[in-house]
Image: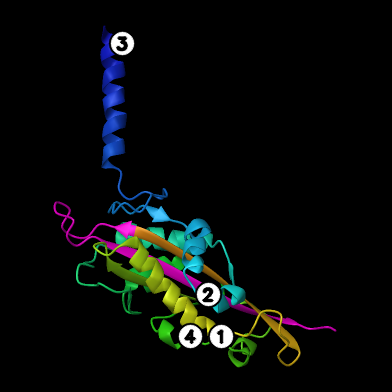
């Protein structure tokens, strides 16, 4: 009997720990959860790219970005803001250290730049040439109320990709003596707001990373 009691207590302890666990990194079916479940770039980028126009799809390739996934997951677990009034994608400002300082720890590398002004992203040959032969990644994070639909969020991100793609060179086209390639990664996570009882201020964090690279044409 003592062994059974001990076993029961151990099982209860394990269950209690599981219930107390916070945000997870598991993929969810976008059902409006607010536990911080993350949809990684390996799957979500394809969903977003399918919502872009045909011209964008010819210029952008999908890139699985584990760094971005980790940065988004960290922000969802630790940034308990209030996204209730953000009914469109809103950029985290650079002075929000939860993103620019802490989440940036995962986006390591000399060619990783966080931008709070993605509307000004320009991937033309002239700009890519400034990065020499190294691929350069611009990345940013948005937040939006969980009250909006996942389809709305996807279409919002797709519209931004369409705008950025207008500045990109056509794939395979020789400009000067180079060709240019572009990859994109998009990751998102549900995040709990301050009101854990009603979930009225739950929100979604979306991370986007676009990389431009040039290759010398040797023929």
- Quadrant for the C terminus in the image: bottom right
Question: Secondary structure under badge 3?
Answer: helix
Circle 2 sits in a helix, a strand or a loop, which is it?
A: strand
Query: Would you say residue 207 sits in the magenta stretch?
Result: yes
Q: Residue at x 50, y 82 (%)?
A: 164
Q: Is residue 105 visible?
A: yes
Neighbor class of circle 3 (other Cα within 10 Å; few <14, some 14-19, many 20+) is few
Q: Return the x and y of residue 194 as percentages of the image width and height.
A: 18, 60
- The location of residue 183, given as percent across then percent down, is 58, 72
**Residue 218 on image: x %, y %:** 83, 83
Q: Would you name the residue on which mark 1 appears?
A: 123
Instruction: Give the image quarter of residue 141.
Output: bottom left
> Which of the two labelled residues, at mark 1 and mark 2, occupies the earlier sequence position?
1
The residue that label 2 is drawn on is 210
What is the distance, in whole Å, between disc 3 and disc 4 at their CAs?
64 Å
Q: CA distance from mark 2 to mark 3?
A: 57 Å
Specify start and end residues of the magenta stretch as a single range.
Answer: 190-219
Kindly indicate whether the residue at mark 4 contacts the one at mark 1 (C-beta within 8 angstroms).
Answer: yes
The residue singled out by tag 4 in the image is 121
């Amino acid at each position: 009997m003592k062994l059974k009691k001990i076993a029961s207590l151990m099982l209860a302890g394990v269950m209690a720990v599981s219930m107390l666990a916070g945000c997870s990194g598991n993929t969810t079916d976008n059902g409006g959860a607010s536990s911080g479940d993350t949809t990684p770039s390996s799957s979500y980028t394809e969903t977003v790219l399918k919502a872009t126009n045909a011209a964008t799809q010819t210029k952008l390739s999908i890139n699985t970005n584990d760094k971005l996934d980790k940065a988004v997951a960290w922000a969802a677990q630790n940034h308990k803001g209030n996204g209730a009034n953000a009914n469109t994608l809103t950029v985290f400002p650079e002075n929000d250290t939860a993103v620019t300082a802490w989440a940036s720890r995962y986006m390591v590398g000399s060619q990783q730049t966080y931008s709070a002004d993605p509307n000004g992203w320009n991937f033309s040959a002239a700009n890519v040439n400034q990065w020499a032969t190294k691929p350069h990644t611009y990345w940013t994070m948005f937040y939006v109320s969980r009250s909006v639909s996942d389809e709305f969020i996807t279409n919002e991100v797709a519209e931004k990709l369409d705008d950025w793609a207008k500045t990109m060179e056509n794939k395979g086209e020789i400009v000067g003596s180079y060709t240019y390639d572009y990859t994109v990664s998009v990751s998102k996570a549900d995040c709990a707001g301050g009101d854990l009882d009603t979930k009225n201020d739950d929100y979604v964090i979306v991370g986007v990373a676009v990389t431009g690279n040039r290759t010398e044409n040797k023929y």
